[in-house]
Image: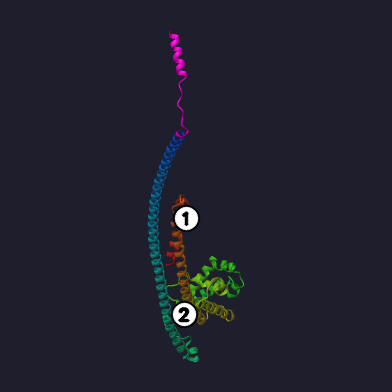
Amino acid sequence: MKSKKSTTHVHGHGHKKLPQCDPDDARIKREALLEQRRLKLARQILHVKEVLNKQHERALNDSSIKRSHIQQNLQVAEKNRNTILQRLVEQCAQEVARCKEVARQQQLKNQEEIDRRRADLERRQKATAARRARLLSVSKSHVLVNGLPHYTRDEAATIIQNNWRYKHLIDVIKTYRSFGISMHAIQNMSFRDAVNLLKENAVIQTTNKFLQRVRKCSVITSGVSKYKNPARVFLSAYMIVAHTNEILVDIGPLEKALLNSSKTLLEELEQWFSEIDNVNSNKIFYNNLLNFLSSWDAYYKNFNTWKSKDSEKLASNLITHYMELEKLWNTVKNQANAETEWRMNIVEQQEEIRRKIRNLG
């Protein structure tokens, strides 16, 4: 019985029909599924874009803030640089003004000294002329009868002192001339050879002695000397005359006056030496000595005037160089190796420039 029922049940079930799937429904479901995926993908893409836009906005904001900070720092640095440069300009201007004032005061002192010496010379020359006239008024017979003219104690002391000074001056002149220094000799030398000769210690020392003895032999340079580095200034006249193009680059009014006074000085000196050679090496030729000293004073004055102008130009060039070094440091100071490779060298050069500017004063 049981087996029969099972068979009947299975048989009956085997004849049941399966439901048929509609193609349109499947297509619709597939499209709906694809649409859902497309919408989901679109939402994801939109979300990614929103995230990227926010990140980009944050980056722009950060970059803008950084640029703003950089600009502020640059403005502060520029302000500090301008302040430093302005302070340096003021300091250098003060140094230049001080140099000019010192040069002006020195020129005034030199002019006062020259005027004083000229007045003293004129007074002494008048006294000498009066004494000469008095001696000429004495007849020869009176001289033969009474012997030498009678001098006061001061006059006799002056004569003895001058004779002693003349003798020592002649000795120094002989030593000076033994070096073979003359306009003709220096002109025939190269610039370097002439410089080497004129800067020898023996030449400088002998020239100093020569100028000192000349001052002692004449009232025009009596008293304490006011000259600064007289030997070097005097010997420079040879270089100015013999090698003008190397010494005087730009020939202006000051340079022309200096060149003319240099020629006059050396011509008076060589004329004086020529008189000594032609007549008597032991005779001093007082008039030639006075002419030489007058030309020496004129040359020294022109030399100082020219040197003051040259010093002002040099000071201006030094200030310009100092400013360029300061600009260079402001350009490189933010580099990693600025302190080790740049700072010390720039500071040393600036200190050297300050020292040179102070020395010009």
Q: Is residue 79 visible?
A: yes
Q: Nearer the viewer, residue 43 or 143?
A: 43
Which is the main secondary structure of the residues drawn in magenta? helix
Q: For mark 2, give the secondary structure.
A: helix
The dot on residue 159 is: 2
Q: In the picture shown, does residue 204 fall above or below 155?
A: above
- The location of residue 52, given as percent across then percent down, is 42, 44
Q: In the picture shown, does residue 228 fall above or below 64?
A: below
| Amino acid residing under circle 2 | Ile
The dot on residue 345 is: 1
- The location of residue 329, given as percent across then percent down, is 44, 56
- Quarter of the image for residue 199 reads bottom right
Q: Identify the magenta region.
A: 1-25
Left or right placement of residue 184 versus residue 36 in this view? right
10 Å crowding of disc 1: few (<14), some (14-19), many (20+): few
Kindly give the residue lying farthest to the top in the view shown: 1
| Colour option used | rainbow
Q: Nearer the viewer, mark 1 or mark 2?
A: 1
* Residue at 46%, 80% in the rendered image: 159
Label 1, label 2: how far apart the Cα atoms are: 64 Å
| Amino acid residing under circle 1 | Asn
